Image: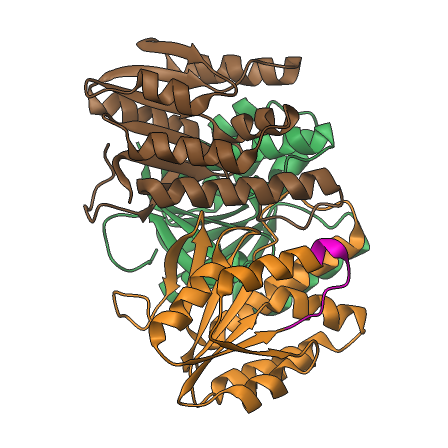
Chain colours: A green, B brown, C orange
Amino acid sequence: MTSGNATLVTGGARSGKSRFAEQLCVRSGLDRIYLATGAPFDDEMKARIDAHQAQRGVGWTTIEEGLDLAGAVMRAAGPDCVVLVDCLTLWLNNLMMAECDLAAETARLTDAIRGLNGPCVLVSNEVGLGIVPENRLARTFRDAQGRLNQDIASVCAQVVFVAAGQPLLMKSRQEPEITL
Amino acid sequence: MTSGNATLVTGGARSGKSRFAEQLCVRSGLDRIYLATGAPFDDEMKARIDAHQAQRGVGWTTIEEGLDLAGAVMRAAGPDCVVLVDCLTLWLNNLMMAECDLAAETARLTDAIRGLNGPCVLVSNEVGLGIVPENRLARTFRDAQGRLNQDIASVCAQVVFVAAGQPLLMKSRQEPEITL
Amino acid sequence: MTSGNATLVTGGARSGKSRFAEQLCVRSGLDRIYLATGAPFDDEMKARIDAHQAQRGVGWTTIEEGLDLAGAVMRAAGPDCVVLVDCLTLWLNNLMMAECDLAAETARLTDAIRGLNGPCVLVSNEVGLGIVPENRLARTFRDAQGRLNQDIASVCAQVVFVAAGQPLLMKSRQEPEITL
């Protein structure tokens, strides 16, 4: 069973996927909650987060939750607001660093998505389209990210792939336009 | 000339491409032949193959052929069964390790595909969408895989790109639904 | 504002994007100008350029410009010819090696594209769909390439993603077929 309320936005690094997801939320006209999955752990990442925040502009309520994403989504979602989760890749990284049970945490999140009583947009990265990484941890992460994207996509009503800032609807509610 | 009988399913690692290809075969209602292109060469790969086999379930006749894929496809194919080749990436790796003539082997396979007298689904990886690899062998493999995918796609009636488990029909028989 | 005259063709390494872009130009029936963004800097690259040239065949006027791409596009474009820029990735590499101001050069190019008085096809690479590179310069390049692709796509009337030689229209003039 999928949730008519959930949209997965996926794509490569710097593909414009976050910007597209933000625009989806803005166009909905609903109150906007930004659910950030991570605090910056180095200067490079801090600069990246600052740039995203500047691009996003005002009008968002920000919540930070690095591990219990299912709980945070359930608490934040509702019929009068849209929740933007940015991003699943950082969340996966946090789970792996904390040695959490990935299958169990993914199941909790897919359950939360199925039970949504309001719209939610989840952003994730595609990381499996390059050459096989030489580093074993990178291969493990790549596999886990691929599995997570499949599992989340399976419970979302819409899946959008973004490249060069352009959205491509890969799974839809059979409606021609991409909306929340 | 393309073969109306052949479908290429491509995508990144852990994109769900094998699962989608298997579902295509199951939905056809035909007898199913699984043409595996490689034996496991280490524990990591053995685990991966075991997981694929568990996912695939029963109801398949398995054939293993690491090098002479054209011959194996010609012998296996027929009007009452569907052949699933999983995957071209491992086959390419075998050819390169055995120092085979890639152009000649690719030509043999495209000839076999053009001559198919029954449906065949071929699974391959996209590996060229990351940063240029520092390792020269990786660059050579990336180029060879890209060329192989182009050559196989050119003789297939359908090409499907899979991301996050979602299929996208990139080349079609002009029919709206993806079928064999 | 987009230019009705510009088409961005993007995809991975060896995806067939250059060949598709060339075919677009040939099918237009216009005089063809090939705007090469780089001279070969090693044997591997020379072999790659030679292969592209052999594939392209005769009937092209070739111009080489590694840095001032905006100027070269403006001088070359016109209503009776089509300009093929191959490729933006090599141009970006040149700009970074020459320590140019990437934002300023990108703005000059998007201005040139908006002002086109004849058709132009620009080829670029997707490099952000693999695992995060360990090398900081590679991460910087990946980010710059992603941003450049977004910026160029935003001013083009058409954006085509190519995989396995198959084109996928991601942004269109609402016309069903991909043409210049």
Q: Position of residue A64 (x, y in %)?
A: 62, 48
Name the image quarter holding the N terminus of chain A.
Answer: top left
Q: Is residue A126 left or right of residue C180?
A: right
The vertical placement of A3 against C5, above or below, is: above
Please tell me which residue is depicted at 41% across the width and 11% down the height of the picture.
Answer: B63
Q: Position of residue C141 (x, y in %)?
A: 71, 60
Please tell me which residue is depicted at 66% across the width and 50% down the height of the picture.
Answer: B131
Is residue C164 visible in the rendered structure shown here? yes
Q: Quadrant of residue C134?
A: top right
The vertical placement of C57 against A3, above or below, is: below
Q: Is residue C39 magenta?
A: yes
Please tell me which residue is depicted at 67% across the width and 44% down the height of the picture.
Answer: B139
Is residue A155 visible in the rendered structure shown here? no
Q: Where does the magenta region start and end?
A: C37-45
- Which of the two residues, B59 or B71, is positioned nearer the viewer here? B71
Q: Position of residue B118 (x, y in %)?
A: 23, 25
Overall secondary structure of the magenta section = loop
- Which of the two residues, B35 or B22, is positioned nearer the viewer here? B35
- Which of the two residues, C155 or B103, is positioned nearer the viewer here? B103
How many tags in the picture? 0
Q: Is residue B140 left or right of residue B18?
A: right
